[in-house]
Amino acid sequence: MRIPTDLYKPSLALLTDLYQLTMAQAAWRSGAARDESVFHLFFRRSPFGSGYAIAAGLEAALDWLAALRFDRDDLAFLATLKGADGGRHLSSDFLAELGRLEPALDVDAMPEGTAVFPQEPLLRVKGPVIACMLAETTLLNLVNFPTLVATKAARIVQATRGEPVLEFGLRRAQGIDGGLTASRAAYLGGCDATSNVLAGRLFGIPVKGTHAHSWVMLFDTEREAFQEYAQALPNNCVFLVDTYDTLDGVRHAIEAGRWLEERGQKLLGVRLDSGDLASLSIEARKLLDEAGFPEARIFASNDLDEHVIESLKAQGAAIAVWGVGTRLVTAADDPALGGVYKLAAVRKAGGGGTWRYRVKVSEQAAKTSTPGILQVRRFSSPGASSAFLADGIYDLERGWGLAGAATRLVNPFDPTLLTRVPGDAVGEDLLVPAMRGGKIVLEGGGLEAARARAQAQLARLPAGVKRFLNPHLYPVGLEPGLQELRTRMILEARKPSP
């Protein structure tokens, strides 16, 4: 099969689910198309049994929104879609409307790298109904997966206790987009480099790599393979030593290391990719030290994740650099974030009317949404680098309770559970302007800034929240007035129909 190099055309407007378009046509027919709406993008459960997640994907989401237009080819394809009766699925006059669409959306968002928690809006999208509807699927696609991988990367980096982590997952990633998105998100979450050369070029991520078993097998002996590699790349020698006998491989790497030293170069290290990584790394460390190579580092790969790494550390493994691939880029133990995008408010076109709030009710408490135009306020102890205490969700139209009132947060699923925030706590609103009228206004963006933000945020999370096993539940609650409004709306929605 030919690789479809023309797959990603300039227009990505059709990167959506059909029901977004059918709802948009229905809204247009009903006259509601230009009414204003507010949607929130959030998730209901932190992935991996984690106590937190790391927000990612905003940069790509804003770029897509800013460029969202239906071109002639898009409209021509949509005109071919058929309904159940064989007639046109989308009308020609609606397609003409799509051709004129220039989404003038306002987006407020948590910057990439922010530590986030269930029920908190990562994005608030405001604008005409059709434009907000058409954004749903793609925004979820562009935010869910990178947030998942950035969170996994942060956990893996935590497990190594400051030792470098190299992302090696391209060959096992879910396609081209999956590989590139995962490499960027992994770096944002704390990985130090990637093996993905295209990600290095596109995102400015450091690129690292060693060699494969096939290089060793190409030659009659392992000794010859290492020698040839040293001659070809004397300034980048990390030898993969487990093709045959691992400890013999270390000894052959030491021989090549001596040859390098004679020429003013260094043996950077050896890589272990199979076997008992704990005991083999300890024995390899002894051989390297005894041979006079204390600075040569031991690299390890082989289906690593935070749990395996934590176990290896507990066993005293002498590993200094961790190559993590499959289980990171595929988020193997929890492969979907489960983010959702819910309508929370509507008002008639013109911007001067009253917002009418909306709530989605469910028999499952976690699936009941929160009405309003929401903002998240994070409270911390006084001081620039002090610990985070709790997050409160409130409605911008109502503000934060009564002036001078004590700060209380109400658990959205159990109103008897209250979190009291100390009076001297410092509050910071997390959703910041990202787009206005369809134009990107977010400042201080970029991958390096997001990576630094993630590290700073993680440093301020309470230790219990970062535990791998049974993490402490970080307090997230509703402002009391918002909780009362939500409860009233739920009860009203559940009244039997007359």
Image (cartoon, helix red, strand yellow):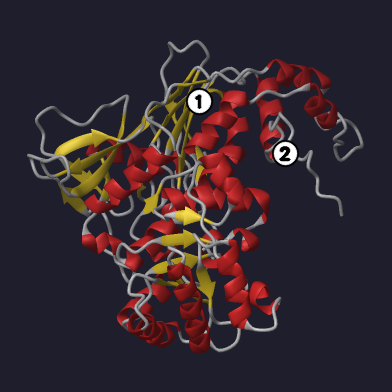
Q: Position of residue 322 (x, y in %)?
A: 43, 67
Q: Residue at x 33, y 44 (%)?
A: 452
Q: Amino acid at mark 1?
A: Ser
Q: Position of residue 15 (x, y in %)?
A: 68, 38
Q: Which residue is mark 2?
A: 18
Q: Quadrant of residue 85?
A: top right
Q: Quadrant of residue 77?
A: top right
With respect to residue 385, does 289 lie above or below? Answer: below
- Foreground residue among 122 and 211: 211
Look at the numbered disc 2 and give the secondary structure of its residue: helix
In this image, 160 relative to 146: left or right?
left
Q: Position of residue 451 (x, y in %)?
A: 38, 45
- Crowding near the residue tagged with mark 1, few <14, some 14–19, many ≥20 C-alpha atoms within 10 Å: many
- Looking at the rendered image, the disc whose residue lies closer to the viewer, 1 or 2, is 2
- Crowding near the residue tagged with mark 2, few <14, some 14–19, many ≥20 C-alpha atoms within 10 Å: few
- Foreground residue among 96 and 210: 210
Tell me the quarter of the image containing the N terminus: bottom right
Q: Residue 37, labelled with which disc?
A: 1
Q: Amino acid at mark 2?
A: Leu
Q: Quadrant of residue 432?
A: top left
